[in-house]
Amino acid sequence: MSCQLSVNVNRIALLRNSRHIGLPDLMRCVPLIVGAGARGITVHPRPDARHITGEDVAKIAAYLRDLPKLEFNIEGNPEHNLMPLLASARPEQATFVPDSVGQATSDHGYSVEGVKRITPLIHAAKQSARRVSIFVDPDLAVIDAVKKAGADRIELYTEAYAVAAKERNDDALAQVLARYIEAAAHARSIGLGVNAGHDLNLDNLAQFIALVKPDEVSIGHALICDALIDGLEQTVKKYLKLCSL
């Protein structure tokens, strides 16, 4: 079975919010992404609403509700603004990310103590979402904590892999990849699904999928950058091709 692609549309909303004329229209872009074959849409609303807003969440949820084979993945910090959005949108997947308020982008996964702290919120989120995924570094102790806390999946934070792949140092890349391969295998061995995301792109995606074999990747920034050159639909298809190798 090929890896599923969920497209993060935060960057589209960020561009729209830089002006006050509603362009680009997010709800014209989402159907193009879906029509090109993506199996899901990811959003990461933040407390300052600098890109995805509550209104965006409601509109995407309503659109995807009529397309039951597609996934809506809402990610964010459950200790900030995430839980009410989950309750109203009832997405297929909720992904918990330990971002601070005002953080530019995600830059680390949960610690063991962090997972313990959000355990009640994991259980609460299951009243709204079909499954809950936890953003983690490739750390076996944290993955064990995720399982104990009752979550369904991990999402591997892949910046370390992306950096190693860009530097083209074969030995360093092999060491980094070994950590992700071990983490994914361990997660599966204890009954967790495996997602991945952050700085995955057309240059590094195929190798990661071939070796780590995630169930799903969430890609936003790189995909939207590529879409400026090749168009949104064609870019989604390029990523889907790599997901199916």
Image (tube, rainbow, N blue to C red):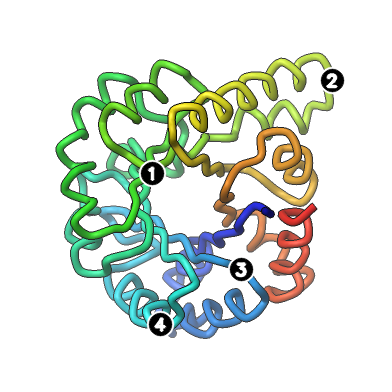
Residue 181 position, x and y percent, is 64, 26
Which residue is located at x 63 percent, y 63 percent?
A: 224
Name which of mark 4 and mark 1 comes first in the sequence: 4
Task: Look at label 2 and name its amino acid.
Answer: Asp
Residue for badge 1: 133
Q: Mark 3 falls on what kind of element?
A: loop
Callout 1: SS = strand
Crowding at dot 1, Cα within 10 Å, few <14 / some 14-19 / many 20+, comes out as many
Image quadrant in which you'd find residue 58: bottom left
Give how far across and how far down residue 32 sits, in percent: 61, 81
| Circles 1, 2 touching at the beta carbon (< 8 Å) | no
Neighbor class of circle 2 (other Cα within 10 Å; few <14, some 14-19, many 20+) is: few
Q: CA distance from mark 1 to mark 2?
A: 31 Å
- State which mark lies toward you, 1 or 2: 1
Residue designated by label 3: 38
Gap in angstroms between the C-alphas marked 1 and 3: 19 Å
- Could you classify mark 3 by the number of other residues whose Cα lies within 10 Å: few (under 14), some (14-19), or many (20 or more)? many
Disc assigned to residue 125: none
* Pointer 4 residue: 63
Pointer 2 residue: 170
